[in-house]
Image (cartoon, rainbow, N blue to C red):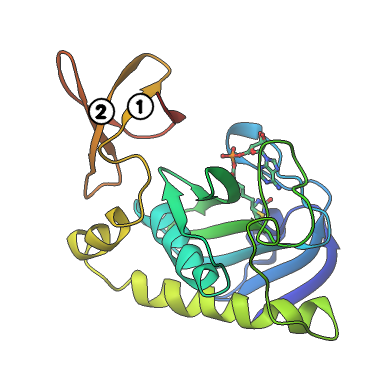
Amino acid sequence: MIHWLESVDSTNRWALEARLALWDAVVAREQTEGRGRRGRYWKSPPGGLYMSIVVENEPLLPLRAGLATRDALQLHCPGRIGVKWPNDLLCDGAKLGGVLCEAESDRAVAGIGVNLEGDSPVGGATTLEVVGGSLPPAADWQTCIKPLTIAIITSLQRLVQLPAPEFLARYRLHEQLLGKPVAWDGGHGTALSIGTDGALEVRTATGTERLHAGEVSLA
Ligand code: BT5
């Protein structure tokens, strides 16, 4: 079941507290306190997609949710949409969306935010409209984004069934960091691969490092 809200502080907070069933989702037209990772914010005015899906928790969930969103959005976008480990969606080199998974025991909510209409709500990011894409017009916001939300849920349902190696083979096709020089807090190197536990494997001057979370940028 999909719950539709005109306004909410955070769909992730709402979904965690509402104790929804597996694969239920909540979609809001706007969020007043949208969450990013590590206490950061997610600016969420009307004109974006703000959705949380209840899923079984597992280490690759953020990557699977990102790829599911990428695949569903790509059908509406002339430019190539990529994923950037661990949780960004990029188009034309700018952030189009992000994923925040928050776990509660064996359940997690996969929170997905995508900028759809108008100019980007924050500097340096982008929207589907800015990169030349659009959803089919509809009478109201709910009718407009419902097919996209269903496509994301359906895609995620398929992706969670794939064994890690098979999923990662697909994910790597769209990962923007692989083969490139990258830097992170504490080092730099060349991004080599994504491990079956979701870690980013990087070759450095002294060997191989496995990054499990954090910020990695193209060097
Ligand atoms: C993310 O965090 O990218 C995860 C965003 C997840 C948002 C969804 S919306 C539905 C669900 N409910 C929630 O409350 N959250 C999830 P992070 O990598 O930490 O990126 C956050 C940073 O991106 C901020 O510090 C800003 O610099 C930037 N930012 C904020 N709003 C943005 C936006 N609308 N578009 C692009 N960048 C943004």
In the image, what residue occupies the spot 21% across and 66% down? 163
Rendering coords of residue 6 (x, y %): 86, 69
Q: Mark 2 = which residue? A: 190
- Quadrant placement of the N terminus: bottom right
Q: Residues within 10 Å of mark 1 (few under 14, many from 20)?
A: some
Residue 141 badge:
none
Q: Mark 1 = which residue? A: 182
Q: Quadrant of residue 155?
A: bottom left
Give the vertical position of 198 relative to 80 (above or below).
Answer: above
- Quadrant placement of the C terminus: top left
- Side (left or right) of 139 relative to 36: right
In the image, what residue occupies the spot 79% across and 57% down? 118
In the image, what residue occupies the spot 20% across and 65% down? 166
Instruction: Residue 115: tell me if it is visible.
Output: yes
Q: Which image quadrant shows ligand 1? A: top right
Mark 2 within 8 Å of ligand 1, using the beta carbon: no
Front residue of 124 and 70: 124
**Is label 1 in contact with label 2 (beta carbons under 8 Å)?**
yes
What amino acid is at disc 2? Thr
In the image, what residue occupies the spot 57% across and 81% down? 150
Rendering coords of residue 119 (x, y %): 78, 51
What amino acid is at disc 1? Val
